Amino acid sequence: MAGKLAAIWATPWCLSPCSILSTAVKRYFAIGLLLPVMCALSLAASGPKYEPGKIVDVEQKTRTRVLYYIVNTPVEKEEPYYEVSVQVKDVIYTGEYSARHAADSQPDDWTTGASIQALVAKHYVYIKRPFGEDLRLLITKHEVVRTSTPEPSAGSSKAPDAKPQK
């Protein structure tokens, strides 16, 4: 009897025959942990999908910011920013880009009609620059571009049915 107890106590609980977790359950548990991790890694490896677009308009604007007050008089500073309109597919996104320094000029590749690669996120549009850096625009508005449908030619249009007069 003492020999059996010693053998039971010497065996790890997970290897004992009366273990709660059988080897099949352990396998399914391991697969259940590894499968979602592998799926998440494969999705993350694909990376963001940039779409072709074009710059519709670029405007430099300024915003006045109050730095502090001296005897109820505000001391203000003009902060320049760029309002950039970008068309991706059938939507024009207008966003704001603030330069790091007030003396910075607009990027040279920002001209009206220039082709770009853009990634549209929830609140931002990321524009891929030629040297690899992304510029982030905060979306202020977006509008759907309506493509004009060709009007039917004069010969193919049908006149509405006229009501017979009595």
Image (cartoon, rainbow, N blue to C red):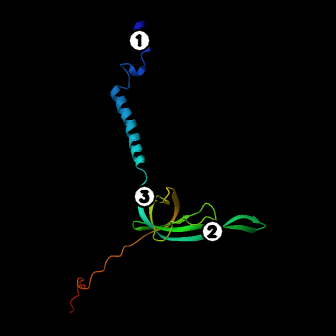
Crowdedness near tag 2: few (<14), some (14–19) or many (≥20) residues, C-alpha within 10 Å: few
Q: Is residue 67 left or right of residue 152?
A: right
Q: Choose the circle earlier in sequence order: 3 or 2.
A: 3
Q: CA distance from mark 1 to mark 2?
A: 80 Å
Residue at point 43% right, 53% down? 48
Q: Is residue 93 left or right of residue 156?
A: right
Badge number at residue 63: 2
Question: Is residue 3 shown above or below 52?
Answer: above
Badge 3 is on which residue? 50
Extreme bottom residue here? 166
Badge 1 is on which residue? 7
Q: Are marks 3 and 2 in contact (CB under 8 Å)?
A: no
| Residue 71: % across, % down | 79, 67
Q: Label 2's element? A: strand
Extreme right residue here? 71
Q: Choose the circle earlier in sequence order: 1 or 2.
A: 1
**Which residue type carries mark 3?**
Tyr
Question: Is residue 155 shown above or below 52?
Answer: below
| Residue 159: % across, % down | 24, 85
**Which residue type carries mark 2?**
Arg
| Residue 9: % across, % down | 44, 14
Residue at point 39% right, 45% down? 42
Q: Label 1's element? A: helix
Q: CA distance from mark 1 to mark 3?
A: 63 Å
Tell which tag, 1 or 3, sits nearer the viewer.
3
